[in-house]
Amino acid sequence: MKKYIVIFALIAAIFASPTALFGNEAAGEKILRWGGDSEGGFPYMFPDPQDPKKLIGFEVDIVDALAKEMGRRPIYVNNAWDNLIPGLDRNLYDIAINGLEVTPEHEEQINFSIPYYKTYLQLAVRRRDNSVKKLDDLKGKTVGTLKESYAQQVLEEVGDIKIRTYIVEANTYEDLANGRLDAAFFDQPIALYSAGFNPEIKFVGPPVGELKYAIALRKKDKELLAEVNRAIVALRDSGKLREIYDRWNLWTPVMAAEFNDFDPPKVEPERYNEWAESHRPALTFHKRMDRYMEVMPLFAKGALVTMEVSVVAMIIAISLGLVLAVTRVFAPAWIAFAATLYVEIVRGTPVLIQLFFIFYGLPSVGIKFSPFWAGAIGLGLNYAAYEAEIYRAGLFAIPRTQWESALALGMTRWQAMREVILPQAVRVVIPPITNDFISLLKDSSLVSIITMVDLTKVYGQVSATYYDYFGPGIIVAVIYLLLGLPFVRFAHHTEKRLAEVEKEGRHGRRENIYRSSTRYVR
C-alpha cells in the first residue's frame, strides 16, 4: 500500500509541475504572463483579507486593465521581490511589476516602460519618540528598510546608521512597534498601508527623494515594450489609472503634478477603507477562528506542493546516494575520488546557493528546469551527499566475515554485494534515512525562492496580510508535524523490527547467506 502511495505522489508531482508554472493556455490565445511578490505586498499585490484565495492590489488592477487594453489574458507568477529581475532573464514571465524603482543600475539589466506611478520615501518612528524629525537625526540609530531598494541607498548615503533590511515590509513595522528598531524608511504607499492607522507609529519629516515605478521587461522585447507603453498612455489619458489610484487612496499631490490632474477624487477610496476596516478592529476568538478556516484551503494546497517536492527529491537522494556510496567503497581510486569530491562540495555549500545556481545559473548554459524540477533536483542532489555517507556507514557496519562467507560459497563480488551485503546495509540505514526525509520535508521551504508557493510561502503571505504570525504559525507547525508523523512512526517500527532481527543471532544470518548462495553453487 505504501508503495502505491509514493508512486501516486510522484505522478501527481510530475503532472502538477508544468500546470502550476504555465497554466492552461487556449490555442492561439494571447497571454500576458506577469511576475510579482504577493508576500507582504500591500498595497501592490496581496491576498484579499476577505477572500485569501483572491489576489488584489492596485498593481493587480493596473495589470488587469493593461492586459485588457492589449487584448491579452493576464497570468500571475509569484516570485520573491529581489528575484523578479533574474526571473525575467529566466523567461518565467513577460513583465515584472511590484513597485520596481527606475534606477540606473536596473536600467543596465532591463528595459523599463514609461512610469505609471510616482512617489517618495516616508520616515516613521514610534508614537512617543520625539528624537527623530529628519534623516540626519537617524545617525547612530537602527533603521529598517526594504532590501536592495532606493531607501536603503539613501540611508547608506546619510551614513552612521545601522541598517536592517527586510523582504516583508510588515515585519519592519512590527519590529518598530516592538522596539527592535528606532525607525522605518519606506516608499509612501508601503508606509500608508503598513502603519498609516497603527496607533503605535507616526510619520515624521518631509517627503524624501523621488521614486518612479515602471514595468520591467527584457532588453530584447522591444515590440512588447512599445505595446505596454501604448497601453499605459491609453489608461492614463482615459482616466483609468486615476480611478485605480483614487480607489486605493494613492492619489497624492506628487501624482497630481505628474499627471497634471488637480481635480478632486472621482471615486471613493473603497479599497483602502476595506483594508483599514479589516485591520483596525480587535477580532474576537470566534472571528479569528473563522479567518483561519477561510485560509485552510491555501495551507492544504501549499502542503501538497511541499509533500510532492519532498517525495520526488528523496527518491533522487536515495538513488544517487546509494550509487555514490557504492562507488566510494568499491570503485577504482580515481572514480571513488570523484564521488568523494562531489560529496564534500555539496555538503560544504549552502543548499540555498545550489537552488539559485540550478534555477537561475544553469539557463545561461542552456539547461532549464521548471520551478518544480529545479527544487526537487536541487534538494535531491544536496541530500544525496548525506545519503551517501549514511549508506557508506551502513556498508562498513557489515562484518567482513559476511563477505568472506559469501565468497567462500562461490559467489562473485557483485553477487555477494547484491544478495548479502546490500540487503543488510539497507536495513541498518532505514532509520537515519527516515530522519533525513523529515529534515528534507522542512528544508523544502527553500523552494519558495524559486517561484513555488509551498507551505512556508503560504504562511508568509497569510501572516503578512493579517499582521498575524501567531495563529498561522501554529497551524503551519501542526501541518508539518502531521506530514512527518507517518515517517516517524515508520522509523520507530523499523527500529523495533531491526532489534528483533538482531536477536536471531549470527547463526541465523549465516543460514540466510547459505540459502541465498545455493543457486550459485553447482
Image (cartoon, rainbow, N blue to C red):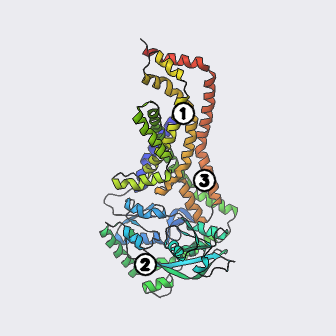
Dot 2 and dot 3 residues touching (CB under 8 Å): no
Q: How many marks?
A: 3
Q: Earlier in the sequence, mark 2 or mark 3?
A: 2
Tell me, yes or no, if residue 417 can be seen here.
yes
Quadrant position of residue 172: bottom right
> Residue 233's spot in the image, x, y percent?
37, 78
Tell me, yes or no, if residue 1 can be seen here.
no
Q: Secondary structure at mark 1?
A: helix
Q: Considering only vertical position in the picture, is 439 above or below 513?
A: below
Numbered circle sitting on residue 476: 3
In the displayed structure image, the side of residue 204 where residue 255 appears, left or right: left
Q: CA distance from mark 2 to mark 1?
A: 67 Å
Asked whether 288 or 518 is in front, the reply is 518
Say few, some or many: other residues with alpha carbon within 10 Å of mark 2 (under 14 / 14 to 19 / 20 or more): some
Looking at the rendered image, the disc whose residue lies closer to the viewer, 1 or 3, is 1
Q: Secondary structure at mark 3?
A: helix
Q: Which residue is mark 1?
A: 393
- At horizontal 46% and vertical 18% (from top left) the residue drawn is 407
Q: Considering only vertical position in the picture, is 63 above or below 409?
A: below
Quadrant position of residue 261: bottom left
- Quadrant in which the C terminus appears: top left
Q: Secondary structure at mark 2?
A: helix
> Residue 213's spot in the image, x, y percent?
44, 74
Numbered circle sitting on residue 240: 2
The amino acid pointed to by label 1 is: Ala
